[in-house]
Image (cartoon, rainbow, N blue to C red):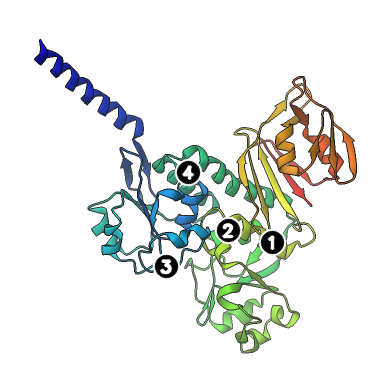
Amino acid sequence: MRKRWLLLFISLLLVSAMFVQVAYSAAVVDDVGRVVRLYTTPKRIVSTAPSITEILFAIGAGDKVVGRTDFDNYPPEVKNIPSIGGFSTPSYEKIMSLRPDLVIAAKSFSKDLFEKIAAEVPVMVLDPHTLKDIANDIRKVGIITGYYRNSQAVAFKVESIERAVRAFIDDHRDKKVFFVLWYNPIMSVNKTTFIGQMLDDIKVTNITADLSSPWPMVNPEYLLSKDPDIIIMPKNSMAYGGKPAFLTQEPWKDLKAVKAGRIYYVNDDWVFRPGPRIVYGLMQLAHIVEPSKFVGKVLTIGLNDRVYAKASYKHELKDDSGTVAVYLNAKEGRTYISKDGASNLFGVEVGTDFIVYGDKTCKVKTDDTGIYIRLRDILNCMGIKDVIWNGDYREIYMLLP
């Protein structure tokens, strides 16, 4: 009898273990077409690129990161995480000494090193080419790490801010733009890269968009023949401390943009890293072509998932993505937002049926619960007129002061 109970107990343990594994299993197809499957949530993750590290921290998995590259600098907490070496020269020994149960790598990762590590540890490869790809990669990382719900809000930020910029910006395709990836040799970006896509988002003409290489090298004659109206370059790598000396040399000094002083600089980390902060790079680019319009913040609210996102061209914003209590009143055709949501997103002081904005007090309509107030009343009180409703995505875009 005792033996029978013992066998039954062991059987139950085995069945329970099977259910636990199933409950924690996750699988994704990475960006090189490989199926990556985990049966337990990863507790020790090695990141091989700054953008990947930023994604992990943004979705709430930062405390699982046990290894990063020498170039990771955001968020500040990464300085306490052991380094695996350079971006293109990580150490196999260092990676394996960290006992990872998941390695997330960029496609530029060494093939030999990848195969060596993948033989021992699950490896997921990311290789985004568009902002949509970046958002999908954020979701994939969320699925494989067990932070999918958080990843949805972060992915929404990338997608909705891009849609908002495209909705608000005017057509500037009469302006020829050259993005300087490097100056010797002269390198730029074509339309298949996420930087090239951002140039298309701000509706300018990228003079290297149709070249065959994603990162084309061009000769001085090509640059002179295209003669761009605007030149954009990363600040830290080319203009740290002042105007780059190469602009005083040929062929640069003879270009229309240089003569007119239409040289603009963007944050390297914001435009080069395919992660959540890419939207700040997009906002900087939008501000270059329309400084009077993109002078404050862009706020987006998605009614389907009840999420929001904010971005600015100047600096990063605290709590730039998350959830908000909001709904569309079908009878009125108006959006209602919770009082605490209104306070958090717009910085207004909320009363029973009024709000205070600066020295202005405005009456607002509440719903039957008294918890929600009409969004339009808030915008009218604040004097916000730049509002777009995207019915395809059930999203609202706003330009805030």
Of 38 and 348, nearer the camera is 348
Q: Earlier in the sequence, mark 1 or mark 4?
A: 4
State the image coordinates of residue 351 (x, y, percent, origin top left). Answer: 82, 32
Q: Which residue is mark 4?
A: 139
Image point (74%, 37%), residue name: 342
Mark 1: secondary structure: loop
User: Crowding near pointer 4: few (<14 within 10 Å), some, many (20+)?
Assistant: many
Visible residue check, residue 180? no
Query: According to the image, label 2 marks what residue?
Result: 197
Viewer-proximal residue among 361 and 144: 361
Q: Which quadrant of the rendered structure holds the N terminus? A: top left
Query: What secondary structure is found at the residue carrying circle 4?
Result: helix
Q: Residue at x 65, y 88 (%)?
A: 248
Q: Which is nearer the eye, 114 or 13?
A: 13
Crowd around label 2: few <14 · some 14–19 · many ≥20 (10 Å)? many
Taking the image as shown, residue 197 lies to the left or right of residue 350, namely left
Real-space Cα separation, disc 3 to disc 2, in angstroms: 28 Å
- Pick out the residue farthest to the bottom: 249
Q: Nearer the viewer, mark 3 or mark 1?
A: 3
Task: Count the numbered circles shown.
Answer: 4
Q: Which residue is mark 3?
A: 70
> The residue under label 4 is which amino acid type?
Arg
- Front of the two marks 3 and 2: 3
x then y, percent, for residue 216: 50, 72
Q: Please, what secondary structure does the residue beneath circle 3 have?
A: loop
Q: CA distance from mark 4 to mark 2?
A: 20 Å
Q: Mark 2 or mark 4, which is nearer the start of the sequence?
A: 4
Query: Mark 4 or mark 2, which is nearer to you?
Result: 4
Check disc 1 and report the residue beneath it.
Answer: 314
